Image: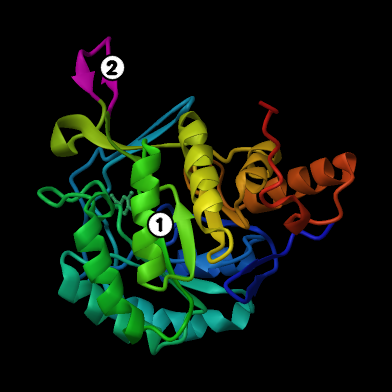
């Protein structure tokens, strides 16, 4: 079965890749992704300075998903600038994920990391866990300003990782921002920000930072993810391919993301839980399903979701 994907002219050997977040911070972790069946190596979102992240406990797993408030622990962009050329040997696309604390940092990081030759760059506009910093993706003007200043500094395909939206008007407005900033691809969705899980036994929150509020991920967010993939596909499919993220635990979940309009899918919570073998498993499950259904490639499924007649 042909599981390859193409994003903004870059070929991915498999359409199933890691999401920026878990297990992609250190050089060892990035190399392990190189050896795995992941169709790309996606880095943790990098900031200007190295960060230790928020106090622990900051990650909570439960049967339907995860709650995290990691606080962007990463080694700082200079380290990823060193790593990227050394990750080329794996022969699969490298996506550098960039997160600034302000517009200037986005510019500095994206411009410098571009010169180190990642295959694509993802601008993360949606980290919910930095105390005192709102998610940029909910501020249209600030998003447009950052993307327009970064765009000319980056020579490779430039993507944007967005938070979930819950109203079609918001997706329309953001699609306009992405078009005007000449963005090449879209990654949806980041975690559902500022969710709260309560342990009724202890009568306590389950993570320490922000009094327990954190980003919700995993199986329970799939319907929100599919809705955003579909909405952006309807708005942008002519111009920008979509990487679908949110709730992918099985080959069927990946298939649903493709139907909604994703060209590739990225796995976060389930990767954190299951480890590197998940890319092989999901590839096999998706391959079998496509064969059963008579498709000859993953690409043949993109956007094929059927709606009901009026
Ligand atoms: C973190 C969480 C995110 O959802 C994100 O996009 C970036 C960073 C974090 O807490 O580390």
Q: Which mark is residue 199?
A: 2
| Residue located 24% across and 72% down the image | 106
Q: Callout 2: 10 Å neighbours few (<14), some, many (20+)?
A: few
Tag 1 residue: 175
Residue labelled 2 has its Cβ within 8 Å of some atom of ligand 1: no
- Residue 8 percent location from the top left of the image: 57, 72
Q: Could you tell me how far apart the alpha carbons at marks 1 and 2 are, in whole angstroms?
A: 38 Å
Observer-side mark, 1 or 2, equals: 1
Location of the C terminus (image quadrant) = top right
Specify whether residue 271 is in view: no
Q: Nearer the viewer, residue 44 or 100?
A: 100
Query: Residue 290 in the image: x percent, y percent?
Result: 82, 45
Q: Nearer the viewer, residue 216 or 70?
A: 216
Q: Which residues are magenta?
A: 196-205
Q: Secondary structure at mark 2?
A: strand
Q: Is residue 81 magenta?
A: no
The disc placed on residue 308 is none
Asked whether residue 203 is drawn in magenta, I would say yes
Q: Is residue 198 left or right of residue 42?
A: left
The image position of residue 86, as x and y in percent, is 50, 84
Q: Is residue 226 left or right of residue 25?
A: right
Residue 252 percent coordinates (x, y): 69, 37
Left or right: 116 as drawn, with respect to 127: right
Against 93, residue 160 (above or below) is: above
**Residues tagged 1 and 2 counted as in contact (Cβ below 8 A):** no
* Quadrant in the picture for the N terminus: bottom right
Residue drawn at x 34%, y 85% is 152
Whether residue 92 is visible here, answered yes or no, is yes
> What's the residue at 71%, 36% (across, down)?
306
Secondary element at tag 1: helix
Nearer-N-terminus badge (1/2): 1
């Amino acid at each position: 079965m042909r599981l390859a994907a193409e994003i903004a002219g870059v070929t991915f050997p498999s359409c199933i890749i890691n999401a920026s977040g878990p297990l992609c911070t250190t050089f060892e972790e990035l190399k392990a992704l190189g050896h795995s069946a992941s169709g790309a190596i996606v880095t943790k979102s990098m900031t200007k300075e190295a960060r230790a992240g928020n106090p622990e406990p900051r990650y909570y797993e439960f049967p339907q998903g995860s709650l995290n408030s990691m606080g962007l622990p990463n080694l700082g962009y200079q380290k990823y600038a060193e790593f990227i050329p050394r990750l080329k040997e794996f022969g699969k696309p490298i996506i550098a994920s960039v997160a600034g604390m302000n517009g200037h940092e986005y510019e500095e990081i994206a411009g410098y990391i571009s010169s180190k030759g990642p295959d694509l760059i993802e601008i993360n506009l949606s980290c919910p866990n930095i105390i005192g910093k709102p998610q940029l993706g909910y501020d249209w003007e600030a998003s447009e300003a950052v993307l327009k200043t970064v765009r000319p500094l980056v020579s490779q395909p430039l993507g944007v990782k967005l938070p979930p939206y819950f109203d079609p008007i918001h997706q329309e407005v953001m699609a306009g921002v992405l078009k005007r900033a000449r963005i090449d691809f879209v990654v949806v969705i980041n975690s559902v920000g500022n969710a709260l899980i309560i342990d009724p036994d202890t009568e306590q929150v389950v993570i320490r930072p922000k009094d327990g509020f954190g980003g919700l991920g995993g199986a329970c967010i799939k319907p929100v993810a599919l809705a955003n993939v579909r909405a952006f596909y309807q708005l942008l499919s002519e111009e920008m391919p979509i990487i679908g993220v949110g709730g992918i635990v099985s080959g069927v979940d990946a298939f649903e993301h493709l139907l909604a309009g994703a060209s590739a899918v990225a796995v976060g919570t389930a990767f954190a839980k299951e480890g590197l073998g998940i890319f092989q498993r999901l590839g096999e499950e998706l391959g079998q399903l496509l064969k059963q259904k008579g498709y000859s490639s993953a690409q043949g499924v993109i956007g094929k979701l059927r709606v009901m007649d009026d």
